[in-house]
Amino acid sequence: MKILPFFVIIPLGTAFLISLFGKRIKNFADLLANLGTLSLLVFSLYSISEVFTHKILVYKVGGWIPPIGICMVLDGLSSFMLVTVNLVSFLVALYSISYMQRYTDKPKFYTLFMLMLAGMNGIIVTGDLFNLFVFLEIASIASYALVAFGTEAEELEASFKYAVMGSVASSFVLLGIALLYSYTSTLNMADISLTLSNKSNGMIVNFITVLFLAGFGLKAALVPFHAWLPDAHPSAPASISAMLSGVFIKTLGIYALCRILFNILGLSHQIFFILIILGIISMIVGALLAIAQADIKRMFAYSSISQVGYIIFALGIGTPLAILGGLFHLFNHAIFKSLLFLDSGSIEYSTNTRDLKRLGGLNARLPITGVTSLFGSMSISGIPPLAGFWSKLIIIIAAIQAGYFGTATVAILVSIITLAYYLKFLGFAFFGKLNETWFKIKEVPWTMRLSMIVLAVICVVSGLLIMPLFKPFLQSAVNVLLLGKGYKEAVFAALR
Amino acid sequence: MSEYILCLVLFCIGLYCVLRKRNIIKIVIGLGIIEYAVNLFFILVGYRLHGRAPILAKDQVIPNMVDPLPQALVLTSIVIGLAVTALIVAIAIRIYEKYGTFDITKIRRLKG
């Protein structure tokens, strides 16, 4: 069965139907959005077994044969990203049923949510460079609107800032695509790679690489380009913060960057070096800025920058073990960061504040939020049996094996700082004496609790992903990146 | 060659406008200039001197035709640019309602 187009069709179709009928039929939007994301999750889990049997699947859109027509490609890396994105998005959609009651127009929220999801899934499955740009813009525009969803002064300000920087980044990407098209006269990713290997690599390829680094680096919020993230992510509704920090920056930033740099343009030592530098700076700056924050969501947003730094650092090392660690950390970070943002949403839902100084002792009133936050925080700061520990350990071991002793030490130190600010969050919010203002608050509704519990459970058990039984799932994603420019042969072999 | 350099100059003018201007409407205009510079560059990539549109008809041979693919892509890109501009202008109007100013240095409630 051809499952590939459904990853784009389902969210687009549900977005269309919700915008048409959402207002007229009660609970229609909730039901359809959750069914849509659930079916996407099922499809993405099914894609794992497809990748196992076929290695690589290519779908020709409209029956046109690439490189003339557009193609969609499903390989290990796409399948891995699809599972991550759709798992988080399903749980977030579940959470939004109750949480979004605080806002007025739920059908519009779900429409934008599904459009954003369509964009992200599209980026992951597409095999065409311009198509990637179109999906990137679909996801970005939906996210600009979602950040401004509350239409309060701060949200509008954050959304404006984000939209301006995001559009500049998109222009850089489009300029890169235009230059690449003028150099290779094709837009199909595999064909570009083929044409580039037949030509001598001039300065133009380096220039294009820099353009893509700037464009996708801004989307991934690497440090020199990070200024929009700590405003945009906290201002959005909590479920959208979870999506943005959990999967959005990874799909639009890291995945797109990896696919283009590793599989199409090819990497040189300089690019690896740049990735390591960017990763280290992001790690340190994000962690240092996070400590000083009193707003919960702002602290988490800075923490996202720091953790993305880990992933980019690991990819920059470039050894098989490091890439494994990086992708594993990507998955783990998607899970625990969305869990933490959902927890912050629960706190906000019950107490109407995000200021750490006004909270305290919430464990007595919000036990489930407290326990899930504990798991999320401990996992992200790398406490042993939890998933975050294993991924950070793999990254640090890989760094030492590759001879980066100094940066490995920095990574360990940043991990300690991470622990410090998450302990600050737990201490101020959940431990200590209960503030008298919060004696009457209740635990959040069951759908919100359910999605938080599921995420916390995944947080605990996802350490098993490196066990031999589940490792092929990660390993097939790593193999795609290790394949490097062999990607084109794989795609063309699947076409025949 | 000179037309490519002029495109780059246009791009830089837009970038300067986004980075240096204080009025948020001017920033939106700067974004528009950046988009048009990239679109123009993309069109010029596929252009040929004295070329014509590659519309195939019976017993007609076109020896010198322009590349139609960038034109189709730029059409898409213009539509995307329109959507972004409309959204940002809508946000800018809402910002004016909330803050009572278009001056970016006075719109500063988020910090840290």
Image (cartoon, grey):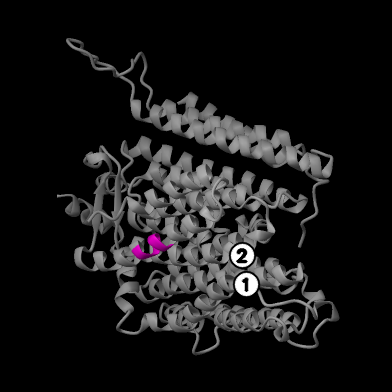
Q: Which residue does the image show at 40% across and 50% down from the upper left? A: A122
The residue wearing badge 1 is A445
Q: Mark 1 packing: few (<14 Cα in 10 Å), some, or many (20+)?
A: some
Q: Specify whether residue A270 is in view.
A: no
Q: Are marks 2 and 1 in contact (CB under 8 Å)?
A: yes
- Residue A89 x/y as whole percent: 49, 62
Q: Main secondary structure of the magenta part?
A: helix
Horizontal and vertical percent position of residue A401: 41, 81
Looking at the image, residue A79 lies above or below residue A133 = below
Q: Earlier in the sequence, mark 2 or mark 1?
A: 2
Is A175 included in the stretch rendered in magenta?
Answer: no
Kind of residue at badge 2: Ser
Q: Amino acid at mark 1?
A: Pro
Q: Mark 2 — residue?
A: A98
Residue at (34% x, 47% y) in the render: A201
In the image, A37 versus B82, the foreground residue is A37
The magenta span reads A38-42
Q: Can residue A100 be seen? A: yes
Of A371 and A155, the residue lying toward us:
A371
Element under label 1? loop
Examine the structure image and report whether residue A40 is included in the region drawn in magenta: yes
Answer few, some or many: residues within 10 Å of disc 2's Cα (few below 14, many 20 plus, some between 14 and 19): some
